[in-house]
Amino acid sequence: MKLVQDFNAFLNDTVNLNSTRFDQLESSIEAIKTAVRGLDWKPAIVGFAAQGSWAHKTIIRPLPGDPFDADLLVYVKPVAGWEARDYIDELHEGMGKLGLYKDKIRRYSHCITIEYAGERKIDVAPCVKERLHTGVWEVCNRDSNLFEKSNPLDYTDWLIERNGICGSNNFRKATRLLKYLRDIKTNFTCPSFLLTTLLGKHVYASDKGAAGFVDVPTTLKTLVDRLDDWLQANPSKPTVRNPVLFEEIQSTAWDDTKYSNFRSKINLYRGWIDDAYDEPDKEESIGKWQRVFGEDFAVREAVEKAGKVSEAALSVVRGSPVSAGVADLVALVKKIGRAALPSGFDRLPHMRRPRWRAAAGSRLTVNVGAQLWTSRYGQNVRSLASLAPAQPGYWVRFNASNNLGLPFPETYKVEWRVTNTDDVARRANALRGDYYRSDEPGFRWEQLSYRGVHMVEAFLIRKADDTLLGKSDPFYVVIE
């Protein structure tokens, strides 16, 4: 399901750089421009221009604790006798003399960087106009002491054209979503300039007004599908050039290992995106989109659904004899058992969908048993059956076994999805729904805490290739 409104809210609330930070960035950049103009710096300044994600309007909000950054080019006329490193060294020295910047400034290969207490970073890069040839602009590499051709304005124009073909800023929004995906997953490498180029190269003039770009989730799916098709057709690292500057090979940011990993991860996430997009059930689709983008996607809907399972169950039986004296789902389960669970209870959207590739063919049987204990290191009270009521404060030791009741061999591991539901857990911010390792091979301990009907499931994974071989049915834990 496309969930267009949820995507719009996710972009506004989580992905996009918020207005406060954007205003801070604009203010800092204007102050830097004023400072650079006032320096006793030999190059004559032609002007300034945004570069990178800031210029392309694909800048995203950083993850908590991380700074966001922006790139500012300062266009200058050449200085007779200066080498490439001189432009950066002299700029660094001049800015370092200013009280406002002397403790914030760093020097790198192509720029100076001004860091604002971990909140934001601004790279200021000299770009020399027509040093040797008319119409040629060059950035300065301090490390190699070489001038390097650059064409940032034409590259920005190329991306503006891609965005215009897609319409409604959908290209920029999809790019931001994939940068966010990269940042939260942290399991593949692709610098923003390379990722943006790869996506831009998969927008064609014939796409103008096409159904594949009608909204944000559709644009995302179209671009990732095309990118994955191209990656799978290139098992070895290809050459990716700047589309407006043939000499610049952007794919040098990868080595063979990084490219292979990027290729594999995009293929995995392509499958997840297609699965979420094609899922007809809204709650299941939310859960699958959360597998892609994390729990912040449609978080309010997911939490509301999980916190109101009693309300949903009671609405079905309201007015019938079984509803007499029943206040919540726990009471209803005690009265009518499994039939009390509302539709979709075992696939609530806040439950994390499996992140492992599923094995082809039939799955192995995984069963879950449980023992009630006075404490984790106390006494075994009794066996606990699924849907059997238990009191809070006790502990449960869950075990996973095969179809013969035997433990799995050491070549496998068991992870546990533990899901709480209903209003008591919601108010405690303890709905969970994530995966947890076994405390010992094939076993998991959990303490009973919140009134409600909760779930524990065992997932069997082959260690050698991280492949999902099977999962148990939910074990329903009823806490009175």
Image (cartoon, grey):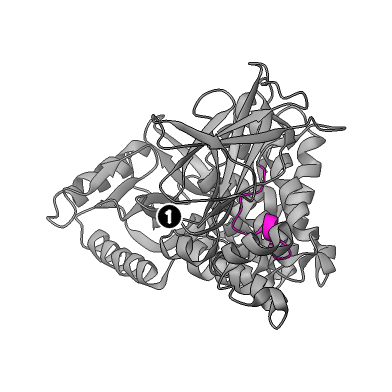
User: Vertical placement of 414 versus 169: above or below?
Assistant: above
Tell me what residue is drawn at x 53 percent, y 33 percent: 444
Whether residue 348 appears in magenta in the rendering, the answer is: yes
Q: Residue furthest right?
A: 361
Point out residue 297 in the picture as x, y percentages from the top left corner.
Answer: 57, 61
Tag 1 residue:
62
Extent of the magenta region: 341-354
- The image quadrant of residue 220 is bottom right
Left or right of residue 313, residue 452 in this image: left
Left or right of residue 362, residue 121 in this image: left
Point out residue 329 in the picture as x, y percentages from the top left corner.
Answer: 60, 66
Q: How many marks?
A: 1
Relative depth, front residue between 376 and 326: 326
Point out residue 443 in the picture as x, y percentages from the top left corner.
Answer: 55, 29
Relative depth, front residue between 442 and 282: 442
Whether residue 411 appears in magenta in the rendering, the answer is: no
- The image quadrant of residue 302 is bottom right
Q: Secondary structure at mark 1?
A: loop
User: Vertical placement of 9 versus 477: above or below?
Assistant: below
Tell me what residue is drawn at x 69 percent, y 52 percent: 199
Q: Amino acid at mark 1?
A: Pro
Relative depth, front residue between 339 and 15: 339
Left or right of residue 73, residue 28 in this image: left
Left or right of residue 249, residue 118 in this image: left
